Every structure is written in C-alpha cells, then in structure tokens.
Image (cartoon, grey):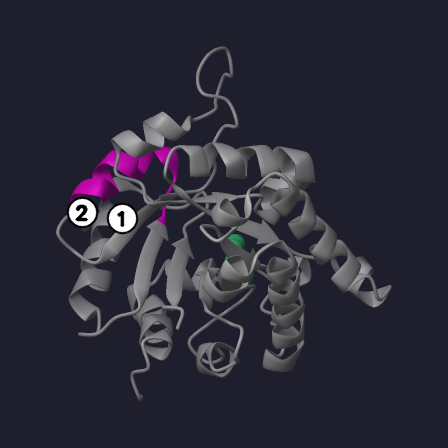
Amino acid sequence: MRRKLVAGNWKMNGSLAANAALVAGIKQGLPADACDVAVCVPSPYLAQVQGEVAGSVVALGAQDISAHASGAYTGEVSAAMLQEFSCHYVIVGHSERRAYHGESDAAVAAKTVAALQAGLVPVVCIGETLAQREAGQTKEIVGGQLDVVLDALSGEDAARIVLAYEPVWAIGTGKTATPEMAQEVHAMLRARLGAKSAEAAAKVRILYGGSMKPDNAAQLLAMEDIDGGLIGGAALKATDFLVIVEAASGVVL
Ligand code: PEP
C-alpha cells in the first residue's frame, strides 16, 4: 500500500513573514493521521523553513537541483547544499523549468540521478501541452519523458522516485484533468514503471498536479493510481492546503 503524499510547490512566492505564517498554519491544522506532507520552497528560504518544520511531520523540499556536484555553475544549487538544509524531496523537471529554462528530458534525467545519488527523493514532473493532448499524443509524450528518466536508473533506483503527472494545460490555469483522464495516464505510467521493475510499479507514488484544489482533490485522490498531489496555487493558503491533506489522509469532511 503506497502512502499518499501531498507536496506544496510554492514556486517563486513567499517572504520571511508569509512563510512563517503559512507553515504555522499548516502545522496547526494537520490531521492526527496525516498522509506524507511536504513543502517545496524557494532556495533562499530553505534555512528558514528547515527551522519552521523541525519536529513536525512536514518534510522540506527544494524546487530544482543541479546535475553537477560543484563548480562554475552560477545560480545552481547542488545536492550537497540541499542536504545541509535537511531537504528530503526535490522537484525536478517542472514544466516551468522545461519551458522557461529549456530543460530537456536528458537534463531532467541527470538531475534525477544527482538527487538519488545524494539520498534525496526526486519528484520527477512530466506532462503534455494542450496542443499535444489535442493531437492525441499524451501517452507518447509523457511516456517518452518518463522513459528517458528510467533509462538513466537501475530498477532499484527507479523505485525510489516520486513521479508527478502534471498536464501543462492544467498548471495554474484553473483547468483540471477529470479524475478519469488523470487515472488513465497514471495507469499507463504505472505500467511503464512496471516494464522497468515490478518494485518500481508497486512503490512509486504518482502524484497528480494541475489546479488541484479543495473542491476537486477528494475525487482525484480517490482514483486507484493517484497517490497524492503536487499543489501550486492552493499550497499558498494553509486552509486550502490542509483540505487537500485531509482528503489524502482519508479524513471524512
Ligand atoms: C505546480 O506548479 O506544480 C502546480 C500544480 O500548480 P497549480 O496547482 O497552481 O496548478
């Protein structure tokens, strides 16, 4: 049985004061038997939020990682640096990094390897654009994105990733995949994980991301292969984030 995971992706939002209030609100409202919960914060705030979540069940995550260990890579953040702030998760291959920073599937695979080598859990994001969905290419695109990552990993390492299916057309748009649409893709991804290793198919949590909100989370999270959510906008308000955490934790509202 896979434990559900709800991870907030704060993107480039926050301030010292706002972060403190947000984390305090999340900690205060967590249900007793909460699912796994994480907040993925901008790098300058890792030290602050490390302190804010200490002693709670909320895990810390980063939003990107360098494929390189150290050196002349201005602006990049290494796995070892993330470890120093007790990061457990790191998002790799978010569609915003793919679109605005030209990250290729190969670069995402290299970042996934760097994270795993350091003992971090990469949250590997994949997803199709609206044009690709309308052209009937969803399975080919997201399956291909996953395969490039899996080709870089052993079967054992493949079982240690978290996968996030994030249709690009649903991110930040208010448009959500229906539970059935998401489930269809998640089931296909699980089959592809299974072609790599039975352990990966059984263990890898496949999160849905793309305008998951308090009013649609329960239906999405009820689907067999949806093991949690990667939450953008709704992760910035403790009350909204907590409703999603409750839905994933099986709390009857
Ligand atoms: C995201 O950025 O990963 C995301 C899912 O954003 P939103 O929930 O705002 O669509």
On residue 193, the disc is none
The quarter of the image holding the N terminus is: bottom left
User: Which quadrant of the view contains residue 176?
Assistant: bottom right
The span from disc 2 to disc 1 (Cα, nearest Å) is 9 Å
Quick check: 76 above or below 40? Answer: above
Disc with the residue nearer the chain's start (2 vs 1): 1
Indicate whether residue 233 is drawn in magenta: no
On residue 19, the disc is 1
At x 60%, y 65%, the residue is 190
Indicate whether residue 43 is drawn in magenta: yes
The quarter of the image holding the C terminus is: bottom left
Q: Residue furthest top?
A: 72
| Secondary structure found at label 2 | helix
At x 68%, y 43%, the residue is 148
Left or right: residue 234 compared with residue 140: left
At x 62%, y 44%, the residue is 149
Quick check: 179 above or below 62? Answer: below
The reply to whether the C-beta atoms of the residues labelled 2 and 1 are less than 8 Å apart is yes
10 Å crowding of disc 2: few (<14), some (14-19), many (20+): some
Q: How many marks?
A: 2
Q: Disc 1, ligand 1: is the CB inside 8 Å? A: no
The residue carrying mark 2 is 52
10 Å crowding of disc 1: few (<14), some (14-19), many (20+): some
Helix, strand or loop for the magenta stretch, by majority: helix
| Magenta segment | 40-52
| Horizontal and vertical percent position of residue 216 | 49, 79
User: Which quadrant of the view contains residue 46?
Assistant: top left
